[in-house]
Amino acid sequence: MKSDLDALMKTRNLDALIVFGNAEHNPPMTYLTGGGHVSHATLIKKQGDAAILFHGDMERDEAAKSGLKLISYSKYDFDALSKKSNKDDLLTGALRCELMLADAGVNSGRVGVYGTYDLSAVFGILSHLQKLMPAMEFIGEAREDSIFMHAMETKDESEVARIRKMGKITTEVVGKIANFLTSCNVNADEVLLNDDSSPLTVGDVHAKIRLWVAEHGAELPSGFIFAIGHDAGVPHSSGNPTDLMKLGQTIVFDIYPAEAGGGYYYDFTRTWSLGYATPEAQELFDQVKEIFEKLNDNFDLNAPFKNYQKMVCEFFESKGHKTPLHTKSPVEGYVHGLGHGVGLNIHERPFSSLSNGDDHRLAPGVVITSEPGLYYPEKGMGFRIEDTLWVRPDGKMETLAEYPYDFVLPMKNWKK
Amino acid sequence: MKSDLDALMKTRNLDALIVFGNAEHNPPMTYLTGGGHVSHATLIKKQGDAAILFHGDMERDEAAKSGLKLISYSKYDFDALSKKSNKDDLLTGALRCELMLADAGVNSGRVGVYGTYDLSAVFGILSHLQKLMPAMEFIGEAREDSIFMHAMETKDESEVARIRKMGKITTEVVGKIANFLTSCNVNADEVLLNDDSSPLTVGDVHAKIRLWVAEHGAELPSGFIFAIGHDAGVPHSSGNPTDLMKLGQTIVFDIYPAEAGGGYYYDFTRTWSLGYATPEAQELFDQVKEIFEKLNDNFDLNAPFKNYQKMVCEFFESKGHKTPLHTKSPVEGYVHGLGHGVGLNIHERPFSSLSNGDDHRLAPGVVITSEPGLYYPEKGMGFRIEDTLWVRPDGKMETLAEYPYDFVLPMKNWKK
């Protein structure tokens, strides 16, 4: 949680944090500002002190929404700094940064640098700054082990409320898509039809998903998945837009909308077969459903996440599937990890990899996905069920948005 | 243009470029890959050689769409590198980067670093890499003067076609909004009404804009502007969602949709007054329209962009308004620059600031905005007209999406 930052800084021997970039699509900045349309900001937090947000004059109103201490860039005489640097923009930036650090009371020590931003400019500025301030050491951290990833790992109730709200939007859109698909007419080749009797394509469904997510004012990363048949069997395939929507084929529908501007995510997957399912598909789906339910019955407070990855692997191997437990990078069977944390990053701590340490665990306040699946692209089928779950402070696991798990969706205007 | 990169590298004494990050929302990467859903990629281009895209195995298909030479990360034995680094993820990344640079034939010299990405991890990797490869110098460049910003400044025909397509989507959405607004019923207080007779708010219009842009599969940055009255007079205000939509008030509507995944943008603004306009507003609008047209009549091939900023300032000052020509950071009158380049960045070279050099010019192939405006927040009014224009290779200026400039939009169900 945010309140852990000072303790984490102490442990890591970081005297200050500096975050570069916009308040949107920039998790560390969004984390501390709460969001808002603040461009080209800089945030400095000295250990033990409140964070200071440096911003352009034009964005004062949006910056004020953060509740942080504010300093306008106009405090620093850009023309004078530019003259001092001989119009070297990177050196000018470094000179300004030096003044900002001084205003934050940071004159020496180890400073962690963060942000999703134009790394060329920041690298150039930091190269100058390191020379200007030899008593300072600037530190980069590995993505999945950064101080922010550790602080973000456990969520407070206001963060969970934001994730829950995205879950509500997600399940509403999924319900609308299910209703739309099952209301379609079907031709003699078992292909779904648009109102004008043209065949319905995966691309048509993609457009509806985008539209209905946008209607809620949420953001839909372009990697969302609505894939049928072969592509449902390839975990990272978004679905081929020209594929026809047919009965009796597996559909994997995986969406992870976020608050507009790159805020909190929700992650969700269902697998459907329209009208009917082949016996083989039904059997594989039932296996995924069985282990999904077994996981929910077994999740334990503070247990290492990888224990459940192992449980899934052992279950699937007992059914004759390949898994990462005994096969390196399988392309068929159970081919990925069980889950990951969800927050301002769609993938964040804790992770479920078998190689992770026990510190990736179901601690109170973490929000994780549980998403077992089976993939057989050559058979033209794939399966995944995914919910986003919160480990509540009382130790109970709570699914943040309920939605039915039905595999076969009966068609309203079609019978076998 | 892309074909200028090698010459620019030579001029800047850069032996290689290295771009980090995803192929989406990452202009330098998108520029060289063309887009596609490739996450956590690395791209290395040696001077004179074709670029190599390094990618994860799972994203082979998307990576292949780039047409670039591909190398899968799986070529590099991650477990061995991780062992060598004692499980230091940043050092592991640097060791892999060293091998990738060697595969690209880059063993010494100056290497520019680029990308919009997690700068903490990249800074950490580069810090290690600099120690591993002392014969190499890693260089960051200032955002607006980077080699990519210079290459991107002039567009080839395929890029212009993509911008033009976004212009078509933009004007279709704007036309739908105009039609929607003018079809509304109006109450006795001159407030527009929803179908259920509740008052129509700016927030309602924002939702429609988001919906109709999404319907086209385009992306709408959350900073788009549809603002009325006072907020129309504040250039960066998105509009207050709870403001009521009323007749006879100025509306500034500024949207800049992009291709999904963060591709090419279009930038567009119109100013409207529904039903009627006050005489004062009409007079100010007419001034903006007059200079907008005068600019179109005067744009000259290869002329410095700032000449036109000066022309606008002089015109507005002759009408009694404050401008940046003789007032530092005015908050009323003409308060911003005339325009900027548009491409994979919503703001890119050339820029129109009076302080810029003559190299910011209307060279063949540049795509710019022309967006004069007037702002009087205390009077509750603001005005801006903006088109995106292409300086064609034949030297003619072409507006990339035509749309009427009407200020007063007559209401279909209301008469004064």
Image (tube, coloured by chain):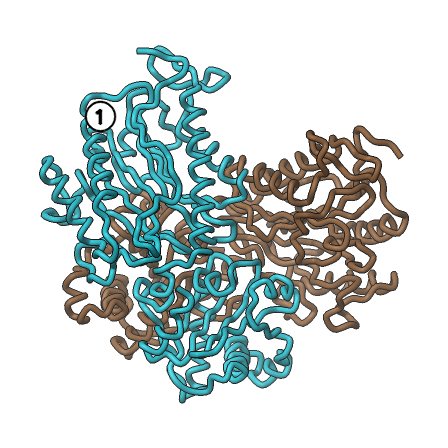
Chain colours: A cyan, B brown
Residue at mark 1: chain: A
Instruction: Return the residue nearer the eye: A339 or A132.
Output: A339
Q: Residue A221 appears at what percent x and percent y?
A: 43, 46
Which quarter of the rendered picture does the C terminus of chain A lie within? top left
Most extreme residue toward the bottom is A135
Instruction: Return the residue nearer the eye: A179 or B66.
Output: A179
Label 1 residue SS:
helix
Residue at x-position 35% and y-position 19%: A410
- Give the vertical position of A185 relative to A99 (above or below): above
Would residue A55 be seen by someone viewing this image from the given angle? yes
Q: Residue B237 appears at what percent x and percent y?
A: 67, 56
Q: Which of the 4 image quarters holds residue A66?
A: bottom right
Task: Characterize the local packing of mark 1: few (<14), some (14-19) or many (20 or more) Cα atoms within 10 angstroms.
Answer: some
Would residue B389 be seen by someone viewing this image from the given angle? no
Q: How many marks?
A: 1
Return the residue at label 1: A282
Instruction: Return the residue nearer the eye: A336 or B309.
Output: A336
- Give the vertical position of A19 relative to B52 (above or below): below
Q: Which of the 4 image quarters holds residue A135?
A: bottom left
Q: Residue B244 appears at what percent x and percent y?
A: 73, 44
Which quarter of the rendered picture does the N terminus of chain A lie within? bottom left
Residue at x-position 22% and y-position 21%: A278
State left or right for residue B416 relative to residue A51: right
Q: Residue A284 appears at what percent x and percent y?
A: 19, 30
Amino acid type indicated by mark 1: Gln
